[in-house]
Structures are given as structure tokens and as C-alpha cells.
């Protein structure tokens, strides 16, 4: 009887202790639990490896930090998902192909014509391929790289027919283009994205398109008019803001763009927005004071939020060909941009510039612009792009 009472007391005590411990653990807010933190950290790692996200460190409250950790964890999961090769749908290729029809009708048509008829596959084919590529803005060094495998294959006679040469070219193009670009993952709250580039390349329009896409995904978006030189530039951003229902932060005309960017970042933190998109004035890459100013804008954003801007996107106009490469090289010296948006690919027959940019800069292309509508901004995915540009198919069936 006594032993039974002692056993009963011990069991009740053990249960009580277990209950007390588990209650204490779950009373901690999410993110402060040891397990949660480990989970958030380990999930954060793959995103950090992509080079686009650093550990979260903001001056906001602890509660905000824990919610930022959750955002990071979710985004890292999504990034993991995105890192896996995904299937390319026929619709995706058709849509891209339509936008790239100028290039397909231009240099791609010239390339494919080299394989038509019963043409012998010999060294003269390489010379002709080289000539077409150079006139399509692929650039000398990249052309050499692209043709390396073709040349070797022809020498070793392992590339016996048209289809094999074409496949070798496509594979090589895919290797050059596959730098892990694509859609911006929202890894921080607020995720601060700074847009830079020379005049008229499509910075403001790209912001409008991105704002539309993020809003459609249910994200809260804020825009900042860092182009304080022209009233029309602010008005253009306000039109987009109104269209997508996003607040637009603006300074007085002629205000310091760094101050506007700083204020906007603070407001984005206060308002709990998911994505802050900061526009800047177009600047000539050859003008040192303007390039210094963009460095200052970046620093100001970092003062308002550690680690921000999380993405700095250089916008390049594909129709300017090799000049776009020169711009990129000079911007790279001033601001360490993390991704590229290549606009107006719909308006050029020389889409080869995409390959050249990836090869020379080794910075991923995040988006390409194939028109003026919001849906014309496409996330860049190398296999889909290669299939759309080099693949066989009829544009007349394009969606
Ligand atoms: N066809 C086509 N037009 C585009 C694309 N992206 C932008 N545009 C057009 O390019 C023009 C310039 O775009 P903006 O967004 O004003 O360029 P910006 O870089 O902000 O120019 P600044 O502020 O003057 O430096 C506009 O007429 C846009 O509609 C695209 O992908 N395709
Ligand atoms: Mg603009």
C-alpha cells in the first residue's frame, strides 16, 4: 500500500514536471525557441549561398526580427524549391518565343539557315557560325567559348550532323546563361530593391511591372521616387503606385535622392511593407559625380536598415547591344549590383547580347523585358530562354 502511494506520487510529480517544462517552452514567442532558431538558420543557409541574402539584422524591434526570420525561412524554402531544375512548360516557351521573335527572325534564322540543305559539316561552318554570332552582339570572347565544343566535336567527328551541332550550341549557351537568376525571393521584411541604370533603359517601368507582380502575389509594396530631378519622373511612378495601390514616397523637387531613399526605408519598416522598390534617376555611367551619388543612395539605405538594399538591379536596354556591356562594367565599379534586368528584348534582332552579358559579367539576369505591359516582364530561367530562342518551332502559333 505504502509502495503504491510512493509510486503514485512519483508518477504525478514526473507528469507535473514534464507539463511545466513544455508549457514554458511553448510560452516563448516563435523564433526565440532554440529549435526554431536552428531551423531558421539552417533554412537561411541555401539562400545566403545564392549570394542575395545576408543574415537578418535590422534595427527594428525583436518582434519584427522574429517575423523577418520567418520570412527568411519561408523564402529559403522557396529558394530551395526554385533551385531544383523545374520543367519548362510549352506555354512558357511559346510566350517567350513571341517576345523574342525579332531575334529569332534575325540572328537565329541566319544561324539555322547555315544548317539547311545537305551542307557538309566542316571547318567553314564554324567560320560562318562565328560571323553570324558576332553580328548578333554575342561578342568575340563569348562566341569563341560557344563554338569551342562545336570545333572540338567536328575535329573528333563526334558531331556528325546538323542536329548534333545545334544541340552542342544550345548546351553551351545554357551553361553560360545558367547563373541562378530569376525571380527575386522576398527574404527580408522589408525587402529593399534599388534600381539603377542609364537614362531611358526602363527602370521606372520595371518598378511598375514588379510592383504589379508582387501585389498580385499578395505582397504589400511601397515605391520610392529617388529620381528627384524631374517632376515627370515622380508623376510616372505615382501613376504606377495608383494602379497597384502602393504608397509612393517622394521628396521635394531637387531633394537629395539619398535622403528620400533613407526616409522611404524607414517608412517601409514602420508600415510593415514586404517590398520597397526604390527608383533612381538615369545617370550616364561616364559621369563620376552621378556615380558617386548612387553610392551615397546605397549607403543611406544601409543606414536606415542594416544589410539593405538586399537587391541592387542594374537595368540594361538590350537594343543598345555591346554598349549595354560597357555600361554594366562601369556600374560594377561603382555599385556592386546583384542582378540584371534586360529590357526591350522584344525590340531587337540581336538577342545574343543576353549570352554575352552572362558570360562577361557573371551576374545573374533576374528578369527580361519583352514589352511595355506588366506581364511582359518575365523571370529569367535559362533552360526556358534557350528553348525559346534556339528551339525549333513556329512563332505563328505563339500565345
Ligand atoms: N518595348 C519595350 N519597351 C520598354 C520595355 N521596358 C521599358 N520600355 C519603354 O522604355 C521607355 C523608357 O522607360 P522608363 O521606365 O521611363 O525608363 P527609365 O530608365 O526610368 O528612364 P529615366 O528615368 O529617364 O532614366 C518607356 O517608353 C517604356 O515603356 C520593354 O521591355 N520593352
Ligand atoms: Mg525613370
Image: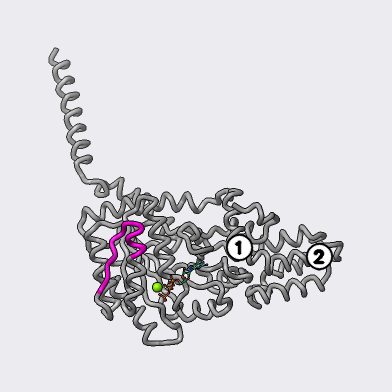
Q: Which residue lies furthest to the top in this view?
A: 1
- Say what secondary structure mark 2 lies in: loop
Query: Is residue 10 found left or right of 92 in the rendered image?
Result: left
Could you tell me residue 138's position as x and y percent? 63, 73
- Categorize mark 1 by other alpha carbons within 10 Å: few (<14), some (14-19), many (20+): many
17 w.r.t. 242: above or below:
above
Residue 166 pos. (x, y %): 73, 61
- Dot 1 corresponds to which residue? 100
* In front of the other: 62 or 399: 399
Residue bearing mark 2? 156
Which of 327/221 is in front?
221
Marks 1 and 2, Cα distance to the nearest angstrom? 34 Å
Disc 2 packing (10 Å; few <14; some 14–19; many ≥20)? few
Picture residue at 63% right of the left edge, 71% below the top:
350
The residue under the point 51% across, 65% down is 365
Closer-to-camera residue (291/317): 317
Q: Is residue 43 among what the camera can see?
A: no
Start-end of magenta stretch: 239-251
Image quadrant where one finds the N terminus? top left
User: What's the coloring here?
Assistant: one colour
Where's residue 391, x and y in %? 68, 57
Observer able to see residue 38: yes
Give whichever of 141, 279 is nearer the camera.
279
Amino acid at each position: 500500500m505504502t509502495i503504491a502511494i510512493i509510486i503514485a506520487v512519483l508518477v504525478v510529480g514526473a507528469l507535473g514536471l514534464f507539463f511545466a517544462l513544455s508549457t514554458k517552452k511553448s510560452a516563448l514567442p516563435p523564433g526565440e525557441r532554440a529549435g526554431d532558431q536552428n531551423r531558421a538558420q539552417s533554412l537561411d543557409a541555401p539562400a545566403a549561398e545564392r549570394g542575395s541574402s545576408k543574415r537578418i539584422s535590422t534595427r527594428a524591434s525583436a518582434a519584427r526580427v522574429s517575423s523577418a526570420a520567418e520570412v527568411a525561412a519561408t523564402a529559403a524554402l522557396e529558394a530551395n524549391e526554385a533551385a531544383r531544375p523545374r520543367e519548362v512548360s510549352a506555354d512558357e516557351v511559346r510566350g517567350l518565343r513571341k517576345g523574342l521573335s525579332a531575334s529569332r527572325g534575325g540572328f537565329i534564322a541566319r544561324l539555322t539557315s547555315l544548317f539547311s540543305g545537305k551542307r557538309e559539316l566542316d571547318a567553314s561552318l564554324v567560320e560562318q557560325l562565328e560571323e553570324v554570332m558576332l553580328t548578333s552582339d554575342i561578342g568575340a570572347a563569348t562566341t569563341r567559348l560557344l563554338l569551342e565544343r562545336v570545333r572540338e566535336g567536328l575535329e573528333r567527328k563526334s558531331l556528325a550532323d546538323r542536329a548534333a551541332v545545334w544541340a552542342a550550341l544550345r548546351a553551351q549557351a545554357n551553361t553560360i546563361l545558367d547563373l541562378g537568376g530569376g525571380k527575386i525571393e522576398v527574404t527580408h521584411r522589408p525587402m529593399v530593391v534599388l534600381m539603377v541604370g542609364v537614362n531611358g533603359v526602363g527602370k521606372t517601368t520595371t518598378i511598375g511591372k514588379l510592383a504589379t507582380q508582387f501585389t498580385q502575389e499578395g505582397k504589400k509594396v511601397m515605391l520610392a521616387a529617388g529620381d528627384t530631378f524631374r517632376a515627370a519622373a515622380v508623376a510616372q511612378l505615382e501613376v504606377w503606385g495608383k494602379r497597384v495601390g502602393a504608397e509612393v514616397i517622394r521628396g521635394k523637387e531637387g531633394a537629395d535622392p539619398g535622403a528620400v531613399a533613407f526616409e522611404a526605408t524607414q517608412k517601409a519598416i514602420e508600415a510593415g511593407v514586404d517590398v520597397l522598390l526604390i527608383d533612381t534617376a538615369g545617370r550616364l555611367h561616364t559621369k563620376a559625380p552621378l556615380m558617386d551619388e548612387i553610392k551615397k543612395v546605397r549607403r543611406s539605405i544601409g543606414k536606415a536598415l542594416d544589410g539593405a538594399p538586399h537587391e541592387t538591379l542594374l537595368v540594361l536596354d538590350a537594343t543598345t547591344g555591346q554598349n549595354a556591356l560597357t555600361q554594366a562594367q562601369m556600374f560594377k565599379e561603382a555599385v556592386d549590383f546583384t542582378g540584371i534586368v534586360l529590357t526591350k528584348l522584344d525590340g531587337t534582332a540581336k538577342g545574343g547580347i543576353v549570352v554575352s552579358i552572362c558570360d562577361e559579367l557573371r551576374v545573374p539576369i533576374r528578369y527580361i523585358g519583352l514589352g511595355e505591359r506588366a506581364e511582359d516582364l518575365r523571370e529569367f530561367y535559362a533552360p526556358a530562354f534557350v528553348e525559346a530562342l534556339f528551339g525549333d518551332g513556329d512563332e505563328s502559333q505563339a500565345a
